Amino acid sequence: MTNRAGLCLVCVLAVCSTAVAQPADPVRTITLLRGHLYRAQEGPRVTVFRVDPDGIVLVDPMSLSFARYLQQQFAERFPDRGVKYVIYSGLDLERVGGAGLFDATAETIAQEQFNQVSRTARERSPELSEGVRSAESTFATRRTLRSGSTPIDLIYPGPAAGVAQTLVYFRDEHVLFAATYPSLAAPFSDRNVRPVSVAQWTATVAEVEFDLLMDGSGATASRAEVIAADGYARAIMAGIKDGNLQDLSAAQLQSSASIARFEGTPFALVRDADIAAMYRRTTVLSLDAVGSVLADRVPTDYEICRGNPSCASPPTGLGLMAGAGFSIGSVRAVAEVGRDAVANLGLYSLRSRSTHVTFLGGYRTGPAGRFNVTVLGGLTYVMNSFRYELPGYGTFTAREEGFLPTFGADVVAPVTRDLALVLPLRFARGVDLSGGRPTSFDVRAGVGLSFTYRRRAM
Protein backbone atom coordinates (compact mmCIF):
# COMPACT_ATOMS: atom_id res chain seq x y z
CA MET A 1 0.00 0.00 0.00
CA THR A 2 2.83 2.33 0.82
CA ASN A 3 4.52 1.90 -2.58
CA ARG A 4 1.21 2.20 -4.44
CA ALA A 5 0.29 5.38 -2.54
CA GLY A 6 3.67 6.87 -3.24
CA LEU A 7 3.36 6.10 -6.96
CA CYS A 8 -0.05 7.80 -7.04
CA LEU A 9 1.35 10.87 -5.32
CA VAL A 10 4.16 11.12 -7.89
CA CYS A 11 1.65 10.89 -10.74
CA VAL A 12 -0.54 13.61 -9.22
CA LEU A 13 2.44 15.92 -8.77
CA ALA A 14 3.56 15.29 -12.36
CA VAL A 15 0.12 16.15 -13.71
CA CYS A 16 -0.02 19.32 -11.60
CA SER A 17 3.43 20.47 -12.66
CA THR A 18 2.55 19.88 -16.33
CA ALA A 19 -0.60 21.96 -15.89
CA VAL A 20 1.43 24.76 -14.32
CA ALA A 21 4.09 24.61 -17.03
CA GLN A 22 1.52 24.94 -19.82
CA PRO A 23 -0.33 28.27 -19.50
CA ALA A 24 -3.96 28.29 -20.51
CA ASP A 25 -4.94 29.86 -23.80
CA PRO A 26 -6.16 33.45 -23.40
CA VAL A 27 -9.90 33.89 -23.16
CA ARG A 28 -11.43 34.93 -26.45
CA THR A 29 -14.85 36.54 -26.71
CA ILE A 30 -16.99 38.37 -29.25
CA THR A 31 -19.86 40.57 -28.03
CA LEU A 32 -22.16 43.06 -29.70
CA LEU A 33 -21.18 46.59 -28.69
CA ARG A 34 -23.93 48.63 -30.35
CA GLY A 35 -25.67 48.70 -33.71
CA HIS A 36 -23.67 46.46 -36.06
CA LEU A 37 -20.39 47.03 -34.22
CA TYR A 38 -18.81 44.14 -32.31
CA ARG A 39 -16.16 43.99 -29.62
CA ALA A 40 -13.58 41.18 -29.92
CA GLN A 41 -11.25 40.34 -27.04
CA GLU A 42 -8.21 38.13 -26.54
CA GLY A 43 -6.95 38.26 -22.97
CA PRO A 44 -6.22 41.91 -22.11
CA ARG A 45 -6.40 43.12 -25.71
CA VAL A 46 -9.55 44.38 -27.42
CA THR A 47 -10.43 45.31 -30.98
CA VAL A 48 -13.63 45.98 -32.92
CA PHE A 49 -15.25 45.01 -36.21
CA ARG A 50 -18.40 46.09 -38.01
CA VAL A 51 -20.65 43.80 -40.02
CA ASP A 52 -22.31 45.37 -43.05
CA PRO A 53 -24.37 43.84 -45.87
CA ASP A 54 -21.42 43.95 -48.27
CA GLY A 55 -18.69 42.84 -45.87
CA ILE A 56 -16.88 43.13 -42.56
CA VAL A 57 -14.65 46.02 -41.50
CA LEU A 58 -12.01 44.72 -39.06
CA VAL A 59 -9.67 46.85 -36.96
CA ASP A 60 -6.40 45.15 -35.90
CA PRO A 61 -6.41 41.33 -36.31
CA MET A 62 -4.04 41.44 -33.26
CA SER A 63 -2.11 38.23 -34.03
CA LEU A 64 -1.95 35.37 -36.50
CA SER A 65 -3.62 33.00 -34.05
CA PHE A 66 -6.40 35.46 -33.19
CA ALA A 67 -6.91 36.19 -36.89
CA ARG A 68 -7.51 32.43 -37.41
CA TYR A 69 -10.03 32.50 -34.57
CA LEU A 70 -11.81 35.49 -36.14
CA GLN A 71 -11.78 33.82 -39.53
CA GLN A 72 -13.52 30.79 -38.05
CA GLN A 73 -16.03 32.94 -36.14
CA PHE A 74 -16.85 35.00 -39.22
CA ALA A 75 -17.45 31.84 -41.24
CA GLU A 76 -19.84 30.48 -38.58
CA ARG A 77 -21.67 33.70 -37.68
CA PHE A 78 -21.65 35.58 -41.00
CA PRO A 79 -21.14 32.92 -43.67
CA ASP A 80 -22.26 35.12 -46.53
CA ARG A 81 -19.89 38.04 -45.77
CA GLY A 82 -16.16 38.31 -46.26
CA VAL A 83 -13.78 40.82 -44.71
CA LYS A 84 -13.83 43.93 -46.88
CA TYR A 85 -11.31 46.12 -45.01
CA VAL A 86 -8.59 45.50 -42.44
CA ILE A 87 -7.51 48.71 -40.70
CA TYR A 88 -4.27 49.05 -38.75
CA SER A 89 -4.71 51.35 -35.74
CA GLY A 90 -0.97 52.02 -35.36
CA LEU A 91 2.49 50.59 -35.13
CA ASP A 92 1.94 48.03 -32.38
CA LEU A 93 3.27 44.81 -33.91
CA GLU A 94 1.33 42.78 -31.34
CA ARG A 95 -1.94 44.17 -32.72
CA VAL A 96 -1.49 44.05 -36.50
CA GLY A 97 -0.46 40.47 -37.25
CA GLY A 98 -2.63 38.11 -39.27
CA ALA A 99 -4.10 40.46 -41.87
CA GLY A 100 -2.78 38.19 -44.64
CA LEU A 101 -5.48 35.61 -43.83
CA PHE A 102 -8.06 38.00 -45.30
CA ASP A 103 -6.12 38.92 -48.44
CA ALA A 104 -8.57 37.18 -50.76
CA THR A 105 -11.33 39.71 -50.04
CA ALA A 106 -9.89 42.53 -47.91
CA GLU A 107 -8.00 45.75 -48.54
CA THR A 108 -5.48 46.49 -45.77
CA ILE A 109 -5.30 50.19 -44.84
CA ALA A 110 -2.94 52.22 -42.63
CA GLN A 111 -1.69 55.75 -42.12
CA GLU A 112 0.94 56.67 -44.71
CA GLN A 113 3.90 56.35 -42.32
CA PHE A 114 3.05 52.79 -41.36
CA ASN A 115 4.81 50.80 -44.07
CA GLN A 116 8.17 52.49 -43.66
CA VAL A 117 8.26 52.48 -39.86
CA SER A 118 6.86 48.96 -39.60
CA ARG A 119 9.66 47.56 -41.78
CA THR A 120 12.20 49.02 -39.36
CA ALA A 121 10.25 47.75 -36.35
CA ARG A 122 10.03 44.23 -37.81
CA GLU A 123 13.78 44.14 -38.39
CA ARG A 124 14.39 45.13 -34.78
CA SER A 125 11.79 42.77 -33.27
CA PRO A 126 11.41 39.74 -35.58
CA GLU A 127 9.89 37.75 -32.71
CA LEU A 128 6.84 40.05 -32.79
CA SER A 129 6.49 40.14 -36.56
CA GLU A 130 4.72 36.88 -37.32
CA GLY A 131 1.93 37.52 -39.78
CA VAL A 132 2.56 41.29 -39.98
CA ARG A 133 1.98 42.56 -43.52
CA SER A 134 2.48 45.95 -45.13
CA ALA A 135 -0.63 47.99 -45.82
CA GLU A 136 -2.00 47.81 -49.35
CA SER A 137 -3.26 51.39 -49.28
CA THR A 138 -2.53 54.39 -47.08
CA PHE A 139 -3.90 57.83 -46.25
CA ALA A 140 -2.34 61.06 -44.95
CA THR A 141 -4.76 62.76 -42.55
CA ARG A 142 -8.29 61.53 -43.32
CA ARG A 143 -10.10 58.93 -45.37
CA THR A 144 -13.76 57.92 -45.44
CA LEU A 145 -14.68 54.32 -46.22
CA ARG A 146 -18.05 53.24 -47.52
CA SER A 147 -19.24 49.91 -46.23
CA GLY A 148 -22.77 49.49 -47.50
CA SER A 149 -24.38 52.88 -46.87
CA THR A 150 -22.39 53.44 -43.67
CA PRO A 151 -19.45 55.89 -43.66
CA ILE A 152 -16.44 55.02 -41.49
CA ASP A 153 -13.82 57.73 -40.94
CA LEU A 154 -10.10 57.08 -40.62
CA ILE A 155 -8.34 59.96 -38.87
CA TYR A 156 -4.67 60.70 -38.21
CA PRO A 157 -4.49 62.78 -34.99
CA GLY A 158 -0.74 63.40 -34.98
CA PRO A 159 2.06 61.52 -33.22
CA ALA A 160 1.03 62.03 -29.57
CA ALA A 161 -0.17 58.43 -29.12
CA GLY A 162 2.33 56.81 -31.46
CA VAL A 163 3.61 57.10 -34.98
CA ALA A 164 1.14 56.24 -37.76
CA GLN A 165 -1.84 56.10 -35.40
CA THR A 166 -5.26 55.75 -37.00
CA LEU A 167 -8.48 56.60 -35.20
CA VAL A 168 -11.52 54.73 -36.54
CA TYR A 169 -14.85 56.49 -36.20
CA PHE A 170 -18.01 54.46 -36.80
CA ARG A 171 -20.55 57.18 -37.53
CA ASP A 172 -23.74 55.13 -37.19
CA GLU A 173 -22.73 53.83 -33.78
CA HIS A 174 -21.03 57.08 -32.67
CA VAL A 175 -18.07 55.01 -31.47
CA LEU A 176 -14.46 56.13 -31.86
CA PHE A 177 -11.76 53.47 -31.54
CA ALA A 178 -8.20 54.49 -30.58
CA ALA A 179 -5.84 51.71 -29.55
CA THR A 180 -4.08 54.12 -27.19
CA TYR A 181 -4.30 57.81 -26.32
CA PRO A 182 -2.95 60.41 -23.86
CA SER A 183 -4.35 60.41 -20.33
CA LEU A 184 -7.49 62.53 -20.36
CA ALA A 185 -6.98 63.46 -16.69
CA ALA A 186 -3.33 64.45 -17.21
CA PRO A 187 -2.75 64.97 -20.95
CA PHE A 188 0.88 66.09 -20.62
CA SER A 189 1.95 63.36 -18.16
CA ASP A 190 4.23 61.67 -20.72
CA ARG A 191 7.17 64.08 -20.77
CA ASN A 192 8.66 62.29 -23.79
CA VAL A 193 5.81 63.52 -25.99
CA ARG A 194 5.91 67.05 -27.36
CA PRO A 195 3.15 69.18 -25.77
CA VAL A 196 2.14 70.54 -29.17
CA SER A 197 1.47 66.95 -30.32
CA VAL A 198 -0.78 66.34 -27.32
CA ALA A 199 -2.69 69.54 -28.06
CA GLN A 200 -3.05 68.42 -31.70
CA TRP A 201 -4.46 65.06 -30.56
CA THR A 202 -7.04 66.52 -28.18
CA ALA A 203 -8.10 69.19 -30.68
CA THR A 204 -8.54 66.62 -33.47
CA VAL A 205 -10.52 64.17 -31.34
CA ALA A 206 -12.70 66.84 -29.73
CA GLU A 207 -14.04 67.72 -33.19
CA VAL A 208 -15.35 64.17 -33.77
CA GLU A 209 -18.99 63.78 -32.74
CA PHE A 210 -18.69 60.43 -30.96
CA ASP A 211 -20.46 59.25 -27.81
CA LEU A 212 -18.04 56.52 -26.79
CA LEU A 213 -14.25 56.40 -27.03
CA MET A 214 -12.77 52.89 -26.68
CA ASP A 215 -9.11 51.95 -26.44
CA GLY A 216 -7.21 48.73 -27.12
CA SER A 217 -7.79 47.41 -23.61
CA GLY A 218 -11.54 47.94 -23.72
CA ALA A 219 -11.50 51.00 -21.44
CA THR A 220 -13.96 53.72 -22.46
CA ALA A 221 -14.30 57.47 -22.14
CA SER A 222 -16.88 60.07 -23.13
CA ARG A 223 -16.59 62.98 -25.50
CA ALA A 224 -17.09 65.33 -22.55
CA GLU A 225 -13.85 64.01 -21.04
CA VAL A 226 -12.00 64.64 -24.30
CA ILE A 227 -13.43 68.17 -24.60
CA ALA A 228 -12.34 68.92 -21.03
CA ALA A 229 -8.82 67.63 -21.74
CA ASP A 230 -8.70 69.73 -24.91
CA GLY A 231 -9.75 72.84 -22.98
CA TYR A 232 -6.99 72.21 -20.45
CA ALA A 233 -4.40 71.60 -23.18
CA ARG A 234 -5.39 74.79 -25.01
CA ALA A 235 -5.25 76.88 -21.83
CA ILE A 236 -1.84 75.58 -20.80
CA MET A 237 -0.35 75.95 -24.28
CA ALA A 238 -1.68 79.50 -24.72
CA GLY A 239 -0.54 80.53 -21.23
CA ILE A 240 2.96 79.14 -21.75
CA LYS A 241 3.23 80.91 -25.11
CA ASP A 242 2.11 84.27 -23.73
CA GLY A 243 4.30 83.90 -20.66
CA ASN A 244 7.39 83.24 -22.75
CA LEU A 245 6.65 86.21 -24.98
CA GLN A 246 6.36 88.40 -21.87
CA ASP A 247 9.56 86.91 -20.39
CA LEU A 248 7.75 85.62 -17.33
CA SER A 249 9.38 82.89 -15.26
CA ALA A 250 7.80 79.49 -14.63
CA ALA A 251 7.04 80.50 -11.03
CA GLN A 252 5.32 83.67 -12.21
CA LEU A 253 3.18 81.65 -14.61
CA GLN A 254 2.25 79.17 -11.90
CA SER A 255 1.04 81.93 -9.60
CA SER A 256 -0.53 84.02 -12.35
CA ALA A 257 -4.25 84.11 -12.98
CA SER A 258 -3.59 84.11 -16.74
CA ILE A 259 -3.74 80.30 -16.66
CA ALA A 260 -6.85 78.98 -14.91
CA ARG A 261 -6.27 76.91 -11.78
CA PHE A 262 -8.90 74.29 -12.83
CA GLU A 263 -10.05 73.87 -9.26
CA GLY A 264 -12.37 70.95 -8.68
CA THR A 265 -11.00 69.03 -11.68
CA PRO A 266 -8.23 66.42 -12.03
CA PHE A 267 -6.18 69.02 -13.92
CA ALA A 268 -5.64 71.06 -10.74
CA LEU A 269 -3.35 68.29 -9.48
CA VAL A 270 -1.00 68.46 -12.47
CA ARG A 271 -1.27 72.13 -13.53
CA ASP A 272 1.84 73.50 -11.81
CA ALA A 273 4.02 70.52 -12.75
CA ASP A 274 2.85 70.78 -16.37
CA ILE A 275 3.63 74.51 -16.47
CA ALA A 276 7.15 73.94 -15.13
CA ALA A 277 7.87 71.07 -17.53
CA MET A 278 6.45 72.81 -20.59
CA TYR A 279 8.13 76.12 -19.77
CA ARG A 280 11.52 74.37 -19.97
CA ARG A 281 10.64 72.92 -23.37
CA THR A 282 9.28 76.10 -24.93
CA THR A 283 11.62 78.54 -26.70
CA VAL A 284 10.98 81.95 -28.20
CA LEU A 285 12.09 83.04 -31.65
CA SER A 286 12.67 86.79 -31.76
CA LEU A 287 13.73 88.96 -34.70
CA ASP A 288 15.37 92.34 -34.12
CA ALA A 289 17.20 95.23 -35.78
CA VAL A 290 20.17 97.09 -34.24
CA GLY A 291 21.84 100.44 -34.94
CA SER A 292 24.96 101.70 -33.13
CA VAL A 293 27.45 104.54 -33.05
CA LEU A 294 30.96 103.26 -32.37
CA ALA A 295 34.28 104.57 -31.23
CA ASP A 296 36.88 102.91 -33.46
CA ARG A 297 40.48 102.12 -32.85
CA VAL A 298 41.31 101.73 -36.52
CA PRO A 299 43.91 99.07 -37.39
CA THR A 300 47.04 100.12 -39.19
CA ASP A 301 48.55 98.36 -42.18
CA TYR A 302 52.14 97.12 -41.95
CA GLU A 303 53.09 97.93 -45.53
CA ILE A 304 51.69 101.44 -45.37
CA CYS A 305 53.08 102.22 -41.93
CA ARG A 306 56.71 101.32 -42.65
CA GLY A 307 58.60 104.55 -42.01
CA ASN A 308 55.39 106.47 -41.29
CA PRO A 309 55.56 108.09 -37.83
CA SER A 310 51.78 108.71 -37.90
CA CYS A 311 51.24 104.97 -37.39
CA ALA A 312 53.00 104.89 -34.04
CA SER A 313 49.66 105.46 -32.34
CA PRO A 314 46.66 103.87 -34.14
CA PRO A 315 44.06 106.49 -35.06
CA THR A 316 40.62 106.56 -33.48
CA GLY A 317 37.30 108.08 -34.51
CA LEU A 318 33.58 107.50 -34.87
CA GLY A 319 32.05 104.73 -36.92
CA LEU A 320 28.58 103.37 -37.59
CA MET A 321 27.11 99.89 -37.48
CA ALA A 322 23.70 98.47 -38.32
CA GLY A 323 22.49 94.90 -38.21
CA ALA A 324 19.67 92.41 -37.91
CA GLY A 325 19.55 89.27 -35.85
CA PHE A 326 17.44 86.52 -34.40
CA SER A 327 17.43 84.56 -31.19
CA ILE A 328 16.08 81.10 -30.43
CA GLY A 329 16.11 80.65 -26.71
CA SER A 330 19.66 81.44 -25.58
CA VAL A 331 21.22 81.09 -29.03
CA ARG A 332 21.73 84.24 -31.07
CA ALA A 333 22.86 84.99 -34.62
CA VAL A 334 23.40 88.44 -36.12
CA ALA A 335 24.55 90.00 -39.38
CA GLU A 336 26.13 93.47 -39.25
CA VAL A 337 27.36 96.09 -41.68
CA GLY A 338 29.69 98.79 -40.38
CA ARG A 339 32.08 101.54 -41.44
CA ASP A 340 35.18 102.50 -39.49
CA ALA A 341 36.28 106.05 -38.89
CA VAL A 342 38.46 107.69 -41.56
CA ALA A 343 42.16 107.32 -40.74
CA ASN A 344 44.40 110.24 -41.75
CA LEU A 345 47.95 108.95 -41.51
CA GLY A 346 49.75 112.15 -42.56
CA LEU A 347 52.41 110.72 -44.83
CA TYR A 348 51.49 111.30 -48.50
CA SER A 349 48.14 112.68 -47.26
CA LEU A 350 47.08 109.06 -46.74
CA ARG A 351 43.43 108.43 -45.90
CA SER A 352 41.96 104.97 -45.33
CA ARG A 353 38.53 103.63 -44.42
CA SER A 354 37.26 100.11 -43.78
CA THR A 355 33.83 98.62 -44.39
CA HIS A 356 32.83 95.44 -42.55
CA VAL A 357 30.24 92.77 -43.20
CA THR A 358 30.16 90.55 -40.14
CA PHE A 359 28.35 87.32 -39.32
CA LEU A 360 28.31 86.34 -35.66
CA GLY A 361 26.80 83.63 -33.52
CA GLY A 362 26.73 83.40 -29.76
CA TYR A 363 25.13 82.59 -26.46
CA ARG A 364 22.89 84.90 -24.45
CA THR A 365 23.12 84.65 -20.68
CA GLY A 366 19.54 85.73 -19.94
CA PRO A 367 16.05 86.09 -21.46
CA ALA A 368 15.67 88.59 -24.29
CA GLY A 369 13.47 90.93 -22.27
CA ARG A 370 15.89 91.28 -19.34
CA PHE A 371 19.37 92.59 -18.74
CA ASN A 372 21.76 90.15 -20.36
CA VAL A 373 25.16 89.72 -21.99
CA THR A 374 25.63 87.90 -25.29
CA VAL A 375 29.05 86.47 -26.07
CA LEU A 376 29.70 86.44 -29.83
CA GLY A 377 32.17 85.05 -32.33
CA GLY A 378 32.31 84.80 -36.11
CA LEU A 379 33.83 86.09 -39.30
CA THR A 380 34.13 89.53 -40.88
CA TYR A 381 34.55 90.34 -44.54
CA VAL A 382 36.55 93.59 -44.54
CA MET A 383 37.17 96.00 -47.42
CA ASN A 384 39.92 98.60 -46.91
CA SER A 385 39.98 101.61 -49.21
CA PHE A 386 43.09 103.85 -49.45
CA ARG A 387 43.61 107.27 -51.01
CA TYR A 388 47.04 108.93 -51.06
CA GLU A 389 49.05 111.54 -53.00
CA LEU A 390 52.57 111.19 -54.35
CA PRO A 391 54.20 114.55 -55.06
CA GLY A 392 54.72 114.94 -58.76
CA TYR A 393 52.66 111.87 -59.60
CA GLY A 394 49.11 112.74 -58.48
CA THR A 395 46.44 111.03 -56.41
CA PHE A 396 46.14 107.27 -56.21
CA THR A 397 43.55 104.87 -54.75
CA ALA A 398 43.91 101.26 -53.68
CA ARG A 399 41.74 98.58 -52.14
CA GLU A 400 42.30 95.33 -50.33
CA GLU A 401 39.80 92.87 -48.89
CA GLY A 402 39.55 89.57 -47.09
CA PHE A 403 38.07 87.63 -44.18
CA LEU A 404 39.06 88.23 -40.57
CA PRO A 405 38.06 86.34 -37.38
CA THR A 406 35.97 88.48 -35.03
CA PHE A 407 34.77 88.12 -31.48
CA GLY A 408 33.05 90.33 -28.94
CA ALA A 409 29.96 90.83 -26.80
CA ASP A 410 26.69 92.75 -26.55
CA VAL A 411 25.47 94.12 -23.24
CA VAL A 412 21.69 94.61 -23.45
CA ALA A 413 19.51 96.60 -21.06
CA PRO A 414 15.73 96.69 -21.84
CA VAL A 415 14.04 100.08 -22.05
CA THR A 416 10.57 98.88 -23.06
CA ARG A 417 9.22 95.46 -24.05
CA ASP A 418 10.52 95.86 -27.62
CA LEU A 419 13.26 98.48 -27.26
CA ALA A 420 16.63 97.94 -25.59
CA LEU A 421 19.89 99.80 -25.07
CA VAL A 422 22.83 97.89 -26.58
CA LEU A 423 26.52 98.31 -25.82
CA PRO A 424 28.42 96.45 -28.56
CA LEU A 425 32.10 95.52 -28.33
CA ARG A 426 33.98 93.97 -31.26
CA PHE A 427 37.58 92.79 -31.70
CA ALA A 428 39.12 91.72 -35.01
CA ARG A 429 42.70 90.63 -35.46
CA GLY A 430 43.51 91.04 -39.11
CA VAL A 431 46.57 90.62 -41.31
CA ASP A 432 48.10 92.95 -43.81
CA LEU A 433 46.52 91.54 -46.93
CA SER A 434 49.39 92.57 -49.20
CA GLY A 435 52.37 91.71 -47.04
CA GLY A 436 51.12 88.98 -44.74
CA ARG A 437 52.26 90.83 -41.63
CA PRO A 438 49.99 91.24 -38.57
CA THR A 439 48.19 94.52 -38.10
CA SER A 440 47.07 96.07 -34.86
CA PHE A 441 43.67 95.13 -33.38
CA ASP A 442 40.53 96.66 -34.82
CA VAL A 443 38.61 97.57 -31.67
CA ARG A 444 35.06 98.89 -31.91
CA ALA A 445 32.89 99.84 -28.94
CA GLY A 446 29.84 102.03 -28.71
CA VAL A 447 26.21 102.45 -27.89
CA GLY A 448 23.06 101.72 -29.85
CA LEU A 449 19.41 100.69 -29.82
CA SER A 450 17.82 97.34 -30.56
CA PHE A 451 14.20 97.00 -31.69
CA THR A 452 12.48 93.60 -31.55
CA TYR A 453 9.84 93.54 -34.23
CA ARG A 454 8.61 89.97 -33.91
CA ARG A 455 8.40 87.27 -31.25
CA ARG A 456 7.06 83.77 -31.67
CA ALA A 457 6.90 80.98 -29.11
CA MET A 458 8.02 77.59 -30.42
Image: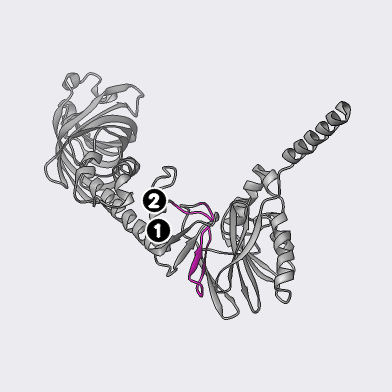
Q: Sequence order check: which comes first, mark 2 or mark 1?
A: 2
As for residue 213 lying within the magenta part, the answer is: no
Residue at the far front in the pictured view: 1
Q: Local crowd at mark 1 within 10 Å, few (<14), some, or many (≥20)?
A: many
Image point (67%, 45%), residue name = 123
Stretch in magenta: 162-182
Relative image position of residue 413 (x, y in whole percent): 15, 37
- Give the quadrant of the N terminus: top right
Q: CA distance from mark 2 to mark 1?
A: 9 Å
Q: Amino acid at mark 1?
A: Thr
Image point (73%, 60%), residue name = 68
Confirm or deny contact between disc 2 and disc 1 (CB under 8 A): yes
Q: Is residue 9 left or right of residue 228?
A: right
Question: In the image shown, does 69 or 54 lie closer to the viewer?
Answer: 69
Q: Local crowd at mark 2 within 10 Å, few (<14), some, or many (≥20)?
A: many
Image point (18%, 18%), residue name = 312
Give the quadrant of residue 279. Answer: top left
Mark 1 highlights which residue?
Answer: 202
From this view, report whether residue 31 is shown above or below residue 301. below
Q: Amino acid at mark 2?
A: Pro
Mark 2 highlights which residue?
Answer: 187
Q: Is residue 438 left or right of residue 389?
A: right
Relative image position of residue 124 (x, y in whole percent): 65, 42
